[in-house]
Amino acid sequence: MAGTFSQIYIHLVFAVQDRASMIQPAWEEELYKYTTGIVQNNKQKMLAINGMPDHIHLFLNIRPSCCIADLVREIKKSTNEWINKKHFAKFKWQEGYGAFSHGHGSVSNVISYVMNQKEHHRRQTFQEEYLGFLKKFDIPHQDEYLFRWIK
């Protein structure tokens, strides 16, 4: 029996340019649906999507042929255009993103984490969250190449 079998789970995180709080509650659900459509059109599977006014989390099940950088580029480009056209906002995602892999055993926990962003950020800032990911996943980094943090 020939075939390719995989379980590749990726948690993506990226922020609005200059960490501005531009994702509005009035249209965030529409943004999530639009983003899910982009993911599906690229033959990947959205497991969870949620965020805050200044950043977004996507949890995906991806195919082995998926190039994460290309997918993120397409999501950012298309959603930038959509937000600017539909909501007349001068919107742009910040350069860079986080991509964190997870095993099958943690899928339900990651989905829960993504879906509870609003509650989670009552206790922790985005900066604390993101630096926590880098530490948890043992990702070396230089502060000057991280997101521009708002003080």
Image (cartoon, helix red, strand yellow):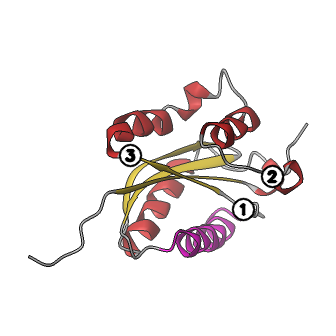
- Which residue occupies the extreme left position in the image? 1
2 or 3: tag closer to the N-terminus? 3
Of helix, strand and loop, which one carries label 2?
A: loop
Q: CA distance from mark 3 to mark 1?
A: 23 Å
Looking at the picture, tell me which residue is in the foreground, 28 or 117: 117
- Name the residue type under label 1: Gly
Specify the label residue 96 is tagged with.
1
Check disc 2 and report the residue beneath it.
146
**Residues under numbered marks 2 and 1 in contact, where contact means CB atoms less than 8 Å apart:** yes
- Name the residue type under label 3: Gly
2 or 1: tag closer to the N-terminus? 1
Q: CA distance from mark 2 to mark 1?
A: 8 Å
Specify the label residue 85 is tagged with.
none
Of helix, strand and loop, which one carries label 1?
A: loop
Q: Quadrant of the N terminus?
A: bottom left
Looking at the picture, tell me which residue is in the foreground, 103 or 129: 103
Q: Quadrant of the C terminus?
A: top right
| Residue 89, horizontal then vertical, whole percent | 74, 62
- Which residue occupies the extreme top position in the image? 123
Residue drawn at (64%, 43%) of the image: 138
Residue drawn at (49%, 49%) of the image: 29
Of helix, strand and loop, which one carries label 3?
A: loop
Badge 3: how crowded within 10 Å, few (<14), some, or many (20+)?
few
Check disc 3 and report the residue beneath it.
103
- Residue extent of the magenta highlight: 67-88
Badge 2: how crowded within 10 Å, few (<14), some, or many (20+)?
some
